[in-house]
Image (cartoon, helix red, strand yellow):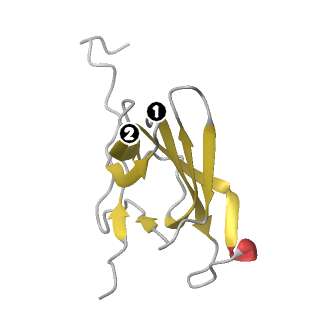
């Protein structure tokens, strides 16, 4: 059974839970996603490292935790498919572990937020009642 790629648009919050374990505890967690240049071209040349999503979460010092990493989509995020290329995990003492290309792979998709056939809002004035 294949996993459906989650789709997000502007102002939605991406939520990616990550289960981790560390004897000292889990502190800050980052999930780093790079945009896929062309559908199906997952590999070093098929990724756009300048188009990055960085989801963040906190394990609250738990030894075993499912950390919900999150990021709110904004208009600066380029639409397309994104692949998780690394998970960065800090323990409470500041030690860093980087998990590169976690398996199984995890992808998400940012969609263009266009309402076809509808014109956007218009500026009518400042709303303070003065016309000049």
Residue occupying the far right of the picture? 45
Does dot 2 land on a helix, a strand or a loop?
loop
Residue 37's x, y, as percent? Answer: 64, 73
119 vs 53, left or right, is: left
Q: CA distance from mark 2 to mark 1?
A: 10 Å
Going from N to C along the chain, the mark reached first, 2 or 1, is 1
Tell me, for residue 63, which label it has, or none: 2
For the image, the number of numbered tags is: 2
Q: Is residue 50 above or below residue 128?
A: below
Q: Residue at x 62, y 39 (%)?
A: 96
Q: Give 15 or 38, whichever is nearer the viewer.
A: 15
Tell me, for residue 27, which label it has, or none: 1
Residue occupying the far bottom of the picture? 1
Q: Give 48 or 61, whichever is nearer the viewer.
A: 61
Q: Residue at x 63, y 50 (%)?
A: 98
- Quadrant position of residue 130: top left
Residue 49's x, y, as percent? Answer: 70, 58
Q: Quadrant of the N terminus?
A: bottom left
Q: Residue at x 43, y 66 (%)?
A: 109
Q: Is residue 101 above or below residue 13?
A: below
Residue occupying the far front of the picture? 23
80 vs 8, left or right, is: right
């Amino acid at each position: 059974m294949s996993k459906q790629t989650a789709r997000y648009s502007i102002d939605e919050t991406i939520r990616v839970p990550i289960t981790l374990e560390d004897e000292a505890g889990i502190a800050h967690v980052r999930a780093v996603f790079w945009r896929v240049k062309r559908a199906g071209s997952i590999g070093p040349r098929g990724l756009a490292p300048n188009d990055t999503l960085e989801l963040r979460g906190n394990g609250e010092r738990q030894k075993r935790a499912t950390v919900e990493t999150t990021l709110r989509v904004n208009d600066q995020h380029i639409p397309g498919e994104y692949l998780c290329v690394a998970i960065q995990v800090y323990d409470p003492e500041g030690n860093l572990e980087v998990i590169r290309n976690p398996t199984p792979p995890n992808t998400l998709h940012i969609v263009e937020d266009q309402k076809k056939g509808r014109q956007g809002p218009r500026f009518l004035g400042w709303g303070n009642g003065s016309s000049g």
